Image (cartoon, rainbow, N blue to C red):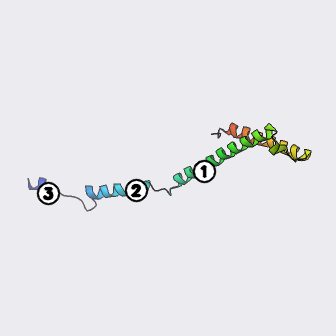
Amino acid sequence: MDKLNQNHFSKNSISHKELNAFLIKAKKDISLSNSPANNKSKEEQDFNDLIKNWSITSQKLLLVMNSKEKVFTNNKDPKSLMAFGAMGAHINMALQALKATGSNQ
């Protein structure tokens, strides 16, 4: 009966208290914000934000260019208007390419 009441642990054993302390520390380590996965998602979010802002700005530019407002056409020579037309065509193509990637938010 004496042997049943005695706790015999090997030299390599770990107590529940020590194990719990390791577990708590491990959880803190996992949640560090400097991990590569978190950096990647931050970079992806930054990129997606840039794409969204670019898309909105490009669409606003196209609206002004297509409206023939004075602010756009005033004091512009024909070559400048043609250049803006080419720019508008390229913006349209870029928006279509963005749509094709599925990245358009």
CA gap between label 3 and label 1 equals 60 Å
For the C terminus, give its image quadrant: top right
Task: Give yes or no for contact between labels 2 and 3 (Cβ–Cβ under 8 Å).
Answer: no
Q: Find residue 54 and report its horizontal and vertical position in percent.
A: 69, 46
- Please indicate, yes or no, whether residue 102 appears anywhere in the rendered image: yes
CA gap between label 2 and label 3 equals 35 Å
Label 1 belongs to which residue? 46
> Residue at position x 29%, y 59% from top?
18
Outermost bottom residue: 11
Q: Which tag, 2 or 1, sits closer to the chain's start? A: 2
Camera-side residue of 1 and 24:
24
The disc placed on residue 6 is 3
Q: Find residue 78 and report its horizontal and vertical position in percent.
A: 91, 44
- Three-letter amino acid code at the position of disc 2: Lys
- Three-letter amino acid code at the position of disc 3: Gln
In front: mark 3 or mark 1? 1
Please state if 85 lies on the left or on the right of 100 as rendered.
right
Q: Which tag, 3 or 1, sits closer to the chain's start? A: 3
| Quadrant of the image occupied by residue 8 | bottom left
Label 2 belongs to which residue? 28
Q: Secondary structure at mark 2?
A: helix
CA gap between label 2 and label 1 equals 26 Å
Task: Give yes or no for contact between labels 2 and 1 (Cβ–Cβ under 8 Å).
Answer: no
> Residue at position x 69%, y 37% from top?
99
Q: Secondary structure at mark 3?
A: loop
